[in-house]
Image (cartoon, helix red, strand yellow):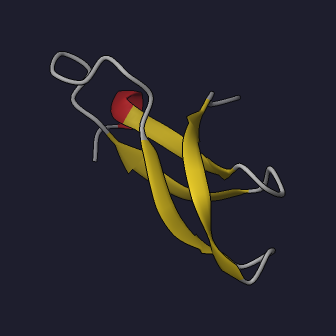
Amino acid sequence: MAQDNLLRMKCTVCKQANYYTSKNKKLVERKLEYKKFCKWCKKHTPHKEARMTG
């Protein structure tokens, strides 16, 4: 996984960053959103693509 393509996935309920993924920016223009398990909420919640800091 290339470092420059790394994206952070953030829970829309508690705003915790739980997952990291990548996307092909040439083919996908919109922000990614997946329903994934949040260990903070302890349930499946929507996770959206968030900005990387640092």
Question: Is the residue 29 above or below the residue 43 in the image?
Answer: above
Closer-to-camera residue (29/17): 29
The spot of residue 30 in percent (x, y) is: 37, 22
Residue at the far bottom in the pictured view: 42
**Residue drawn at x 58%, y 56% as measured from the top left:** 46
Q: How many marks are shown on the rendered structure?
A: 0
Question: Is the residue 42 above or below the residue 19 in the image?
Answer: below
Considering the image in quadrants, where does the C terminus appear? Answer: top right
Report whether 15 appears left or right of 52. right
Report whether 16 appears left or right of 6. right
The spot of residue 24 in percent (x, y) is: 21, 29
**Residue drawn at x 71%, y 79% as measured from the top left:** 39
**Image quarter of residue 13:** bottom right
**Residue drawn at x 42%, y 38% as measured from the top left:** 32
**Residue drawn at x 56%, y 42% as measured from the top left:** 48
The spot of residue 37 in percent (x, y) is: 58, 75
Report whether 28 appears left or right of 33. left
Question: Is the residue 47 above or below the residue 41 in the image?
Answer: above
